[in-house]
Image (tube, rainbow, N blue to C red):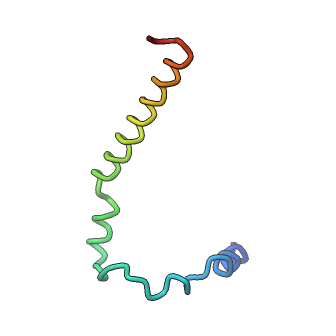
Amino acid sequence: MLIAAFAHFYAFPYKEYAGTNIGPPVGFTASLGHVLMLNNFYHDTVHQASKQGNRRQELLFAYGCIN
């Protein structure tokens, strides 16, 4: 695993992202709160489900299964 970590460090150097504007630093609780927000999960799930549902209906219509 240590060899893989060094290989990953070599293959994907952090220096290309150093100095980017990533916003102000926030505390641990704010970061944890952002990670645990369920509204983003809900939005992504609903968006993906609606996209799949539309695609499923398009396929059923194309194959003549529904009118």
Q: In this view, does 9 lie to the left or right of 15?
A: right
Q: Which of 48 and 31 is in front in this view?
A: 48
Q: Percent position (x, y) of residue 51?
A: 42, 36
Q: How many labels does the image show?
A: 0
* Image spot of residue 60 (x, y percent): 51, 19
Rendering quarter of residue 13:
bottom right
Q: Position of residue 8 (x, y in %)?
A: 66, 75
Position of residue 25 relative to residue 52, above or below, is below
| Residue 28 found in image quarter | bottom left
Q: Nearer the viewer, residue 40 or 17?
A: 17
Q: Is residue 45 left or right of residue 29?
A: right
Image point (32%, 47%), residue name: 43
Q: Position of residue 4 (x, y in %)?
A: 70, 73
Q: Residue at x 38, y 82 (%)?
A: 21
* Image quarter (top left, top right, bottom left or bottom right) of the C terminus: top left
Q: In this rendering, is residue 65 above or below 28?
A: above
Identity of the residue drawn at 51% across and 12% down: 65
User: Residue placed at 32% from the left, 67% from the top?
Assistant: 32
Q: Is residue 45 above or below residue 59?
A: below
Q: Quadrant of the N terminus?
A: bottom right
Q: Which of 13 and 21 lies nearest the eye of the viewer?
A: 21
